[in-house]
Image: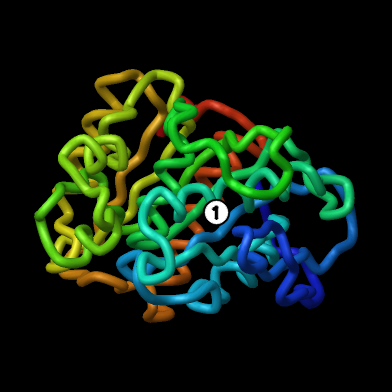
Amino acid sequence: MLELLPGQVTIENDVVFGTTGSRDLKGDIFRPPVEGNQYPGILIIHGGGWYQGDRSQLRYYGIQLARYGFVGVACEYRLSGEAPWPAQIHDVKAALRWMRANADQLGIDEGKICVTGNSAGAHLALMLGADTDVFEGASGSPNMSSKCAAICAIYPPTKLVFNKNEIENKLFGKAGSDDVAAKASPINYAASSFPPTILIHGNADEIVPVSESFNMYHALKQAGAPVELHIFDEAPHAFDSLAEFARPCVQLITLFFDRKVVNPRAVEVPEETEQ
């Protein structure tokens, strides 16, 4: 089981991981307190409805996950006001490929790169699990795979709909259509080959209904993919911005990634002994 490492996390800000052709894409690196190699990696993707937010939003996750021995990279991506879909998935794929291409320098095991994201970032994290080349073509390390080992999606939109609301229409831009929305919906990629996935949501979420996670859970479970679902009672959208919820979320993430990727193992409950 992963345990907290003694010492201080090292943070390296504004590292370039790719380019859009017009500007650089940057991320922040969070390194464990103890130097080493073959650490698991974790790509951290912020939310904000695809039109706002930045990578500093999930700094807490970067620091705390590094304390458990993950090398974290919190990445930026083009927001919908700068470029419409699929620029966002192109950019996070570029970040993941950059991590794999620089595995030795980062001290990570390139086969153990996980992903976590919140809200719109959770949508992008799930889209990284889609076994499709529809959204290939991102900048940076083009010869590297953008597959991830496991996913955490915290209050994720899982089914996008064209003309559903202004936020999603802004994401799709002028090329938006029912077909584009369907191809941008993680739930449509549920398959037995989907990476192990943990879904976390609050049942008082009025921005992304908890049904989005329930539906994704059932789709993945029915497909035969490893999946867990954790629901927090009376928790609204972005509930993990509160420390009392952020801490258990980190623990859920580390436990799941540990037993599915870092130290794979089955759940074995010891037999009860007679009293």
Q: Amino acid at mark 1?
A: Asp
Quadrant of the rendering where the C terminus is positioned: top left
- The percent coordinates of residue 140 (x first, y second) are 70, 49
63 or 208, nearer to the observer: 208
In this image, 21 relative to 78: left or right?
Answer: right
- The percent coordinates of residue 205 (x first, y second) are 17, 66
Evaluate whether residue 273 shows in this view: no
Q: Secondary structure at mark 1?
A: helix
Q: Residue at x 41, y 28 (%)?
A: 226
158 or 180, nearer to the observer: 180
Please tell me whether residue 161 is drawn above or below residue 248 in the rendered image.
above
- Asked where in the image residue 243 lies, by quadrant, the reply is bottom left
Please tell me whether residue 27 is drawn above or below residue 125 in the rendered image.
below
Q: Residue at x 21, y 44 (%)?
A: 159
| Residue that mark 1 sits on | 91
122 or 179, nearer to the observer: 179
In this image, 31 relative to 223: left or right?
Answer: right
Q: Residue at x 30, y 73 (%)?
A: 239
197 or 251, nearer to the observer: 197
In this image, 68 relative to 37: left or right?
Answer: left
Please tell me whether residue 58 is drawn above or below residue 210 in the rendered image.
below
Please tell me whether residue 152 is drawn above or below residue 31 in the rendered image.
above
- The percent coordinates of residue 174 (x first, y second) are 24, 55
- Asked where in the image residue 217 lies, by quadrant, the reply is top left
